[in-house]
Amino acid sequence: MIAGGIGVGIAGVLAACTRPSPSPSAHPTGTGTTMPSRTPTSSPTPGGPDSWQALAAAVTGTLLRSGSAGWDGARVLENPRYDDADPQGILRAASTADVQAGLAFARNTRTPVALRSGGHSYTGWSAGGAAGTDVPRSLVISTQDLDDVELHPDHSVTIGPGARLGDVYAMLAQAGRAIGAGSCPTVGIGGLTLGGGVGVLARSFGLTSDQLTGVTLVTPDGTVHEVSSTAEPDLFWACRGGGGGSVGVVTSMTFRTKPAPGILLFTIVFPWSAAAAVVRAWQDWAPTADRQLWSTLKLLNGSRHSAPTVTITGVWTGSKTGADASVDGFITSTGATPTTHTARQMTYGQAMSALAGKPQRVSEAATSSIGTQKLTDAQIDVLVQHAAAAGDVPGNREGGVSLDALGGAVADIGRTDSAFPWRSALMTVQYTAVFADGSDPAPFDAYVRGFRAAMTPAWGTAAYANYCDATITDPADYFGVNTSRLHRIAEQVDPTGVLSQPHWV
C-alpha cells in the first residue's frame, strides 16, 4: 500500500450512496451564475476497469474485499453504531489516478459508491452499507491515506483532505502558521471543509472553507479539475460549504494561513440553577463579542454526571487584558457565580492539542439546528428542560446540547457567496446522546430528534450540513437559498447520479 500524495475523498462527514435516475426537469434552476464551460486539467481515460480484478490491477493503493487482511479495521467508522457495515469493497486511494479508476469501475459496473475521508459520518453513509442507513452495499472510495501537508513559501498550505486535524495543526504550528478548523483531532479536513467548517477560531479566521483558495476535484465522469475563485468558480463555490459528495471527489485543497496566534483558553462552569440565566447572557454576548473571541456553551446530563452541567469553553486570540474585560463582563451579566473559572495562555499548537482531549470511538446519536435568532425566556426554558431530560433516557451516558458561536469573520461573507448560507446566524446547535456500543440507537435518536423538534418553533428546520441527520429530507434545510444553484451544479457534473446520497442535493 502506498500512503501519501495530496488529497482525499470529498466526504469525510458525508458520503455518496444510492444511484437514482435523475429527473432534471423536476429540479429548480434557482439563482446564481450559469456554470461556465469547464476547462479540465485532464480528461478521463476511456474504458477503465470493469471487474474487481481489473480495479485491483489498475490502482497503486489498496483494494480490500471481505476477508482481506485489514478488512475489519478498514470498514468501520468512528461511530461504533455502524460497525456492522458490509461494503462490497474499499479502495484506499493513493493518488488522484486511483480515484479516477474507482469512479470508472463504478460507472462501468453500476456499483454504488460511498466516499470517505475521516470516517466521521453522522448518518453512517460513508460506511458503504451499514444497517439502518438506507445505503446499499457500495464501493467505498477512501482517500484517508492521501494526507500530505505541504507549506509553501507564500505561506499557503496544500493539504490532502484525508489529513487529520491534529496532524494539520501540529505541522502548521511548527512553522508558526495557523488555520481555523474544528477541535476533534481525528476529523479529516476534507469533509470538515466541504460542509463549511465551523471551528474554534471561526469568529477570527472564518469558516475553514473561507480559508480555501484552490481545490483539485475529480468529477464523476473521471475528469480532473483544478478549481478556484477564477477557474471553474461554480465548482469552487460548491466546495465551500456544499457538503461532501455533492459535485465530486476532492484530492487536494489549498488554504491561506495566518501567523499562529497566542491563545487564551478558558473554561467557566456554572451551577445548573443558573442555566437559563447563562443561556440568556451567552446569546447576548458570544455571537457579537470581539471577533478575537469564540466560545461554546454546553448543557449536558447523563450517567457520566451526578447532576446536569453548564460549561462554557472559549478561545481568545487577542491580549489577555481584552479577554479579561469581555469574559468578566459576561459573567457579571449572568447574575451568577461560577463554580469554576480557569484560563491558560498557550501557543496555537498547545491550545489545539488541549482542545482535542483524548479522542475515542463512541456510539452516538446527533442532529442539529442553526440558531438564527435569540431565544425568548420561554424558549430558553424549553432548551434547558430538554437538556436536563438527557438524564431521563435509560443508557444515555452523556447528552444534551452544544451552542457554538458564529458572527465575526463568518458574517463578513455574503450568504450566496459560498454554498454555506447561514452567514447571519448567531450559532450552530448540536444535539447529542452517547450510549454503550451495541445498544439499540432508537431511544437516543428519538431524544436528539425530539430536542431538535422542540426548538423548531424558535429556529425553524435549518441544519448544519456537517451535522447531517437522515430524517432531514429537504436539502434546503442544509443549504437554504443556495440549494437550487448547488443542485444545478451537481446535476451538470453528475447527471447519472453516481454520487447520489439519501436526501442530498
Image (cartoon, rainbow, N blue to C red):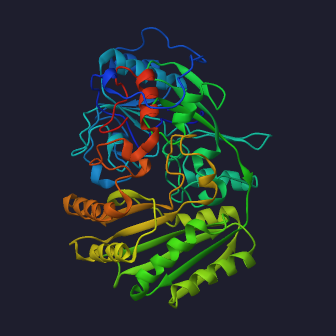
The residue sitting at 58% across, 54% down in the picture is 181
Is 10 or 22 nearer to us in this picture? Answer: 22
Residue at screen point 41% across, 82% down: 275
- Residue 174 placement (x, y as % from top left): 73, 55
Q: Is residue 277 above or below residue 490?
A: below
**Rendered view: 210 above or below 395:** above
* x and y, in percent, of residue 188 in the image: 51, 47
| Residue 95 visible in the current orientation | no
Q: Position of residue 466 (x, y in %)?
A: 43, 49
State which quadrant residue 434 falls in.
Answer: bottom left
Q: Is residue 495 left or right of residue 169?
A: left
The foreground one among 23 and 72 is 23
Q: Residue furthest top?
A: 46
15 relative position to 485: left or right: left
Q: Is residue 207 visible?
A: yes
- Residue at figure coordinates x 53%, y 56% from the top left: 185
